Structures are given as C-alpha cells and as structure tokens.
Image (cartoon, rainbow, N blue to C red):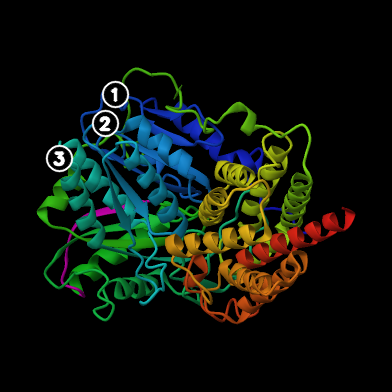
C-alpha cells in the first residue's frame, strides 16, 4: 500500500484548527471565535458588531489555499474570514456566526469565490442573516480564464484574482463608504480581473496518497486550486513559453473575459500555488511584464509577486491581470495591516479567542432533542434504515475518494464519511426516532455541523425540504406516500438552489429515477416495501449511467470528458448506496414484524 504524502502535521483532521491557533498566536491583531472545531472563524481583534461603524467585508472558503483567506483579515481588507475544511466550503452555521460577530449597522459584504458549495452555503447564510435584520450584499468572483464558455450552471471558477477584489472592497469599506458603494466597487473590480494557473505537480491532501496523474515530463494548464484536472496536459515548456500562453489565454479577444485593450493600465499578480520557490515566481514576473508592455501595449502599474492563494503544496503558479483605473489603484495602495498583504503588526495582544455570538446548536424543547426510551415499530424501522445507510457510506469512503480523485478534488468519500459517522453518533442520543419528521431534521443538523463543501449543503437542503414535507403531512404514522412526497420535495429543493437536474452527472441522477419509480409504483397500489426496493434498483442504475454523462454542474464540469468517461459520479454512487441500503434494511425489518 502506498503511504500518505509526508507532512509536518499531527492528526490530518485537525490541520485547519491548528492552523488557526498558530495564525492568531503569530498575529496579535487577529482572533478566532471559540467554536472550534465546528466553527472556524478568524476576525479582527479590534472589531465587534456592537461597536463597528463601517461596512464589514467577509470572505472565506475551503482551507488549503493559505494565506487566503484568513491571512487577509485586517484593517483595510477583510473584517473576518471563515475557514472550511481542506478544499471544502464552510458550513452555513460558521458563516452566520461570523456575520453576527462583526456586522454593525452599516451592513456586511460577502465576497464569495464562484464554487457551487461556496455559493450555496454563503447564499443560505445570507438569506438567514437577512431574516435576523442584517443588511447583506454579496459579490461572486469568477476570474478563471482557462476554460472557454459555456460552463453549464457552474460558471467561471474563483481564483487568485479574488485577493485583489478583497483589497479593493476592504479599502472602500475603510474609507467609510456605504454598503451599496462598497459592493459596487467590489463587483466592478471582480469584472476587471482574469486569472489562469499552470502546475508541474498535483497537491497532496493531508493524510491522503498523492495522485500520480502527471508524469515526470508533463505539466498541466488551466487547472483549478483544488487539485482537479486542468484544461490540458502538455510537455514541460520553458517558463517564457508558459507565460506567453497564459497571457494570450487571459487577454484573448475571442473569450473577452476581461475588458482589456491596448493602451490600458493593468495590475499584474504572479501567484505561487504553494510549492513553487520565490525564485521561479520572480522569473515568471520578469518575463510577464515586458510581454504585457511590448506585445500587448499595456501599462503595468503594479506588480504583486508571491504566494497569495495556494493549493497546499502544488508546484505551480497563476497569473492574474486586472484592468486598473485610478480608483482601483488608490484602493490597492490604501494602507492595510492584513498580515499577508503583507504588513507588520504592532500594538497590545488581546485574548486569542472570543465567544461565539450564538449557541451552535439550535434550541429545542428538551424532550424532542433526545432519543426516546422506547422505540415504536416505526422508530425501530427508521433506526435500522439510518444505521444501514450510514454504515454503507462509511464503508465506501475509499472508493468514493478514488473516483473523486479522478474527476474532482478527491475528498467526496472523506466528506460523506464525516457526515455518516456524525449521524451514527448523534442517533444514539439525539434522534427522536418515533417522530420521522423531527428525526430527518436532526439528521440535517448532524450533517450541517460536520460536512462542509457542496455535499454538506446539498444534503442539508435535502433534509430541510423533506422535514417540511413530512411535517406538513404529519399523522400518527408516516406513510410510504409521505416519504415519496418528501423525496420529491427534496429533489426539487436541490435542483432549485444548486441548478442541476437529470443528466447533469450529479447525485440527482440517482435520486430522480428512484423518486419516479417510487411514486409510480405506489400510485398503482404496489406493496410499499416492494416499491422501495424497485426504486433502489432505479437509483443504482441511474448512478451507474453517469459514466456516460457530460458533467454540467459542480467541480467535475471543469474536467474534460475523456478523464471521466469510465468513472461514475461519486455523489450519485454514494446516494444510490445509502438509498439501497435503507431499502434493504426496511425490507428486513418488516419481515420481522
């Protein structure tokens, strides 16, 4: 067996928490909310919602991109940043905690990188915050220029250009502008920047085996920052040739991703992806500046070279080019003490952590929060189904990671396993198994607490929609038709917020066929257990059919069709597995009664 990549870490599951602890010890102007490990929020030590009289600028995303985004927390840049697990978007609860901690009467701007999980989690948190009275605006940054349009519902990825947007927004907020004005400047900046990355190696996730996707003489063009495959694999070229290709791609008049023409002023950012020496980054910068000046007729007004948004230890770099008017230059030049811009720090050292503004777990009546002492027949069946579904997901962890490593970032199995493990642990104490609707709600709470990324928010949406449907039709016993309607509502919710539907190569390609078969069989009077089993067969067939589909949503949509032509969608396979396991468990339980 190939050992995991060598890292200077302790437990791979603790890397983000320990990174935050080290960060605030290093920079006394930063604090974190006392909610680790679930709530991983870094914020300015001199700001609280009670006394902050400027617009709060908040960003965040999956960890592994350090110094982004926590390293840009400081006066003149971000007010706070949320750290998800490695390459996984932060949870809704964490984002809400951050909004509550720093947002004053002037409101809050969320700067969000354009990834499905980030859009969903930040979007749901923003909607919840608005119901609590907060004034919220959101700017989505998608500066990727590697892949030609269209990109389905996924759109352009958010890359290192996001850091420049942070600086513009933070400076505008520090100048005392209104929320609408800060949001307008951030949006304008996001539309002026384009980025493309290249790499010589694949990054190694903590505790996992490094992919050998690239050979010794190959390099990858147009890859993202999560280890997902790029637009093309080519022979290694001299850096001057690579820089020429990247500049041509960003400034291409055919795609017109950035409105830059001859005679414009621009800002150049050469960004290391984590494993590239500064010497090599400076060489790239030295080649890029004269090419922009002589070949494209551009005035290069600012150059930033360093590691601003990395991909763990990936050997590679990205180039960002931003069209710069006088207003943008003034924002970029404005003072900031964000540690990774970089600047020095001084002043007194406040406490390293402060309390989370609101309890992490929602308050409920005490009786409904705990497992009943005696289970009804329905409760025993539900318990068996949940246990079987969670167990099969845990057992599939390595297979799901292997599939996902070929078409995405390689963490689908790990993410799903965290959720399944939490479900099994919480079921022992918290799930009111005699009440189907409340149990589904508690499953959603377990998932929301530990599962970041797109999978976490999608399953949270599934549970919320199912809970609402079951609650609306609550009787002494939940019927098979109630479950069928709950599944149908869950699918509709995921499709509405995530943008995917049948044929998009997602988990819905397993659940939609299952729902249709279940509804059809029940409508003609089929035995409910038989209908459930037949719908599980449809789920499996649907998941397996994703091998032949072109991805149109999620991270796989950035991957060429040739790469995943023989690989099923990991999310669909996971959904089919837990659905089928639940069907088998229900059938076995009914045979006992």
| Position of residue 58 measured from the top left corner of the image (x, y, whole percent) | 33, 42
Residue at coordinates 62% horizontally, 58% vertically from top-left? 482
In which image quadrant can residue 16 be found? top right
- Which badge, 1 or 3, is on the more N-terminal residue? 1
**Number of marks drawn:** 3
Can residue 8 be spotted in the picture?
A: no
Q: Quadrant of residue 76?
A: top left
Residue 322, located in which quarter of the rendered image? bottom left
Name the residue at the right extreme.
Answer: 592
Residue 299 lies in the magenta-colored region:
yes
Tags 2 and 1 touching, CB below 8 Å: yes
Question: Magenta stretch: dominant SS?
Answer: strand
Q: Is residue 178 above or below residue 251?
A: above
Mark 1 vs mark 3: in front: 1
**Residue that mark 1 sits on:** 50
Quadrant where the image shows the N terminus: bottom right
Where is mark 3, residue-wise? 177
Please give the name of the residue rendered at 54% of the width and 54% of the height, measured from the top-left corner: 469
Give the residues drawn in magenta, as a range: 295-307
The residue beneath circle 2 is 104
The structure residue drawn at horizontal position 70% and vertical position 42%, both measured from the top left corner, is 433
Residue 565 drawn at (x, y percent): 61, 80
Q: For mark 2, give the secondary structure.
A: loop
């Amino acid at each position: 067996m190939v050992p995991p990549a060598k890292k200077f870490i302790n437990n791979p599951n603790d890397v983000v928490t320990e990174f935050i602890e080290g960060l605030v010890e290093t920079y006394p102007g930063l604090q974190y909310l006392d909610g680790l490990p679930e709530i991983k929020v870094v914020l300015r030590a001199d700001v609280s919602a009670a006394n902050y009289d400027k617009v709060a600028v908040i960003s965040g995303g999956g960890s592994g991109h350090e110094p982004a985004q926590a390293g840009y927390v400081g006066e003149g840049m971000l007010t706070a940043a949320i750290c998800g697990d490695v390459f996984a978007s932060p949870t809704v609860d964490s984002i809400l905690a951050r909004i509550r901690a720093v947002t004053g009467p002037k409101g809050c701007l969320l700067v969000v990188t354009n990834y499905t999980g980030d859009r969903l989690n930040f979007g749901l948190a923003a909607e919840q915050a608005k119901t609590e009275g907060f004034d919220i605006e959101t700017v989505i940054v998608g500066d990727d220029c590697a892949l030609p349009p269209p990109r389905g519902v996924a759109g352009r990825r958010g890359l290192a250009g996001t850091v420049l947007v942070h600086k513009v927004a933070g400076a505008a907020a520090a100048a005392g502008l209104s929320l609408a004005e800060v949001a307008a400047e951030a949006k304008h900046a996001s539309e002026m920047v384009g980025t493309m990355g290249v790499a010589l190696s694949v990054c190694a996730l903590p505790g996992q085996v490094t992919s050998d996707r690239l050979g010794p003489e190959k390099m990858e063009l147009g890859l993202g920052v999560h280890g997902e495959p790029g637009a093309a694999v080519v022979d290694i070229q001299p850096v001057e040739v690579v820089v020429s290709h990247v500049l041509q791609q960003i400034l291409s008049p055919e795609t017109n991703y950035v409105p830059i023409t001859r005679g414009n002023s621009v800002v150049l950012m050469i960004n290391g992806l984590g494993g590239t020496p500064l010497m090599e980054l400076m060489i790239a910068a030295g080649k890029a500046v004269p090419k922009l000046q002589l070949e494209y007729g551009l005035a290069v007004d600012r150059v930033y070279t360093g590691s601003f948004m990395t991909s763990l230890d990936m050997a590679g770099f990205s180039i960002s080019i931003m069209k710069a008017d006088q207003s943008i230059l003034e924002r970029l030049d404005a003072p900031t003490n964000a540690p990774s811009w970089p600047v020095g720090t001084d002043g007194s050292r406040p406490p390293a952590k402060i309390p989370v503004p609101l309890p992490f777990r929602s308050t409920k009546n005490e009786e409904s929060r705990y497992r009943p002492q005696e289970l009804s027949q329905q409760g025993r069946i539900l318990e068996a189904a949940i246990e079987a579904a969670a167990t099969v997901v845990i057992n599939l962890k390595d297979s799901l990671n292997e599939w996902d490593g070929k078409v995405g970032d390689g963490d689908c199995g790990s993410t799903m396993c965290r959720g399944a493990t939490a479900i099994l642990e919480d079921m022992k104490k918290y799930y009111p198994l005699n009440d189907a609707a409340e149990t589904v709600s508690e499953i959603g709470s377990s998932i929301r607490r530990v599962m970041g990324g797109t999978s976490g928010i999608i399953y949270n949406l599934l549970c919320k929609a199912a809970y609402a449907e079951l609650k609306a039709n609550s009787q002494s016993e939940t019927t098979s038709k109630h479950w069928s309607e709950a599944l149908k509502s869950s699918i509709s919710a995921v499709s509405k917020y995530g943008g995917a539907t049948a044929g998009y190569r997602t988990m819905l390609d397993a659940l939609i066929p299952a729902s249709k078969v279940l509804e059809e069989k029940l409508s003609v009077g089929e035995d409910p257990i038989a209908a459930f089993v037949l719908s599980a067969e449809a789920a499996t067939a649907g998941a397996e059919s994703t091998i032949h589909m072109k991805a149109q949503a999620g991270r796989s949509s950035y991957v060429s069709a040739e790469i995943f032509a023989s690989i099923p969608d990991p999310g669909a396979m996971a959904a089919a597995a837990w659905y089928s396991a639940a069907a088998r468990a229900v059938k076995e339980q009914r045979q006992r009664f």
